Image: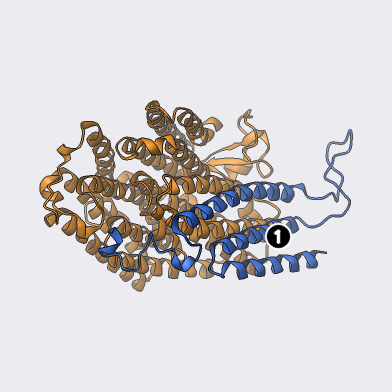
Chain colours: A orange, B blue
Amino acid sequence: MSWLLVLPVALPFATAIAAFLLRERAAGRWVSILGSAALLVVSGLLMAQVLERDVIAGQMGGWAAPYGITLVADRLSAVMVLITAIVALAVSVYALADIEARLERLGYHALFQVLIAGVNGAFVTGDLFNLYVWFEVMLIASFGLLVLGGSREQIDGGVKYVALNLIATILFLTGIGLLYGTTGTLNMADLSRAVEDVHPGLLTANAMMFLIAFGMKAAVFPLFFWLPAAYHTPAFSVSAVFAGLLTKVGVYALLRCFTLIFDHDVGYTHEILLWVAGLTMITGVLGAAAQTDIRRILSFHIVSQIGYMVLGLALYTPLALVGAVFYLVHHIVVKANLFLVAGAVQRLAGATELSRIGGLYRSAPLLAALFLVPAFSLAGFPPLSGFWAKFVLVRAALEDGGWAIAGVALLVGLMTIYSMTKIWAAAFWSPHPDGREPALSTLPAGQRRGFLIPIAGLAALTLVIGLAPAPFVTFAEDAAAGLLDPSAYVAAVLGEPPVEVSALEDAR
Amino acid sequence: METLLALCVGLLVACAVYLMLAGRLLRYIFGLVILSNAANLAIFLSGRLTVGAPALIAEGAEAPAAGIANALPQALVLTAIVIGFGLFAFTLVLAFRAFSHLGTLDGDDMRLAEPERPAKEAGA
């Protein structure tokens, strides 16, 4: 059983080693794809186990729960691991067309797989300090990917990304230290019991450190400045995987900690989250309106969409958490896909700056159609996935009496349409300023497949979630119920004796 | 002793913030290093200070005697130091590359990725 918990982390690491050794050859990229495909299988198995048994936990090295390192997967963790695997597979196929041989020789595929390992580690760990370690694994891999190739823009964006993310890291570490000082434990399930004995004022102060640290990772207002400074500079594959996954790890950590550990004074902490959510939505979408480069527009939209997820957590009702979980999953697919489309646009039309491109609707209608699916889903058009996500959240806000925040959410949705139509009008509809007619058929067949298969696959997933939302909403309901009432989670980690003694070394 | 160390943490944080607000990348990095050392010291302190009682289990005993030093924060600090060292090394190299590519380490002059006028001249 615990092997299923270890594999989502161990498999990408193994793939990374193999891909690094084979980085000089074409085999390296196929190893990466194969590793991602295997990860998808493992994640599917993990999901099946979780659906059957609600929560599965494993103690690394056989040390019983509050002392050793726990890996644990509930519905939220399992779906995040699964969606990570889907994005990883899509992006590693996309890399066939997007990543030049020079970057491959520098170890692109290895860094990419280490990043995936870090992301998965953060999702399955049940220990706060271990979460910190996975954040660091993720961070160092993302640093490498961000500046890989070393263009001047990348270095410039990288400096800001590194500088601000390191502050969040140190704050997180300090928060962990103080929480240990007041409770004497770092196991998340154990903490949810132990915090009851702590003075609520001290605990709230500590919660604020975590709020700022995770908020910075999640790029919420007013801590998001590193994101639009850096996300438009690296290769498109890198942008896509960052956009899809990295900020969502911050949101996941917020969701986990502010339901499991810091739920002692919801009126105070979650009120702050509510303001943060509203301001994040507004500043993100206004920032996007001012931009004229596809990737920079999309980067600001990551910020505004994070606001919706935080809104779900801030309202803290069962329906709102359903919305947050649903939004999280939908957004990862859609956002990664939009960046992948941006890469194809750049290759065909020669730029991502809106004033310098155009004509793609006439010359590449398939790409135009594939852009519309994630773009409309992001804006919340029915019947795509984004509509249901926004619908659940707005309804939760109205049921809770939050008329103002519901209005903000709807207004921001409207302005998202403005940005998407701006991209549509400039890149697809208006003629190319240089008179170019960039058709998909001008690309070599292999590259064309590399671009289109992942984009079409993710678009199909968006359509499936949109057209048949019932099973996904039911799943999100169960996941949200598990977040609101963590007794099953706590029992799985602490109550049962370790199921199997695994031979693995202490993961630290 | 705890009070003294707590004051020391506060002093380190103050120095770090002062350095980081100077607007120069190199000073910012030094500030980060001091800040991470302050964090490490705070973790060490959160395990409570115990004098002259190493975390050792006597021969033949099953469990350590009461009142020994808490080994866990020390393990955490050790991990954090190792990670911090790696990140510091990376950041220094990044700063060096930034200087050789951009010709400046002044935060206000680093506008390449986000030019003030994103219109036409950005592509030139």
**Label 1, residues with CA under 10 Å away: few <14, some 14-19, many ≥20:** many
Residue at x-position 63% and y-position 58%: B33
Residue A362 visible (yes or no): yes
Q: Is residue B34 left or right of residue A343?
A: right
Report how many numbered discs are placed on residues in the image.
Answer: 1
Which image quadrant: the C terminus of chain A? Answer: top right
Query: Which residue, as the protein is rendered here, is positioned at the far bottom?
Result: A404
Answer with left or right where residue B120 lies relative to residue A210.
left
Q: Quadrant of residue A87?
A: top left
Chain letter of disc 1?
Answer: B
Kind of residue at disc 1:
Ala
Residue A302 in picture, x, y percent from top left: 36, 57
Is A337 situated above or below A403?
A: above
Between residues A74 and A21, which one lies in front from this camera angle?
A21
Residue shown at 40%/30% (left/top)?
Answer: A41
Quarter of the picture containing the N terminus of chain A is: top right
Give the SS element for disc 1: helix
Q: Is residue A328 above or below residue A316?
A: above
Residue at coordinates 62% horizontally, 36% vertically from top-left?
A60
Residue A289: % across, % down: 28, 66
Residue B96 is situated, as x and y percent measured from the top left of the image, at 53, 53
Q: Within the image, what quadrant is residue A201 found in? A: bottom right
Residue A413 seen in the figure: no
State the residue position of label 1.
Answer: B42
Pick whichever, A459 or A66, lies toward us.
A459
Residue A469 placed where, x, y %? Answer: 29, 47
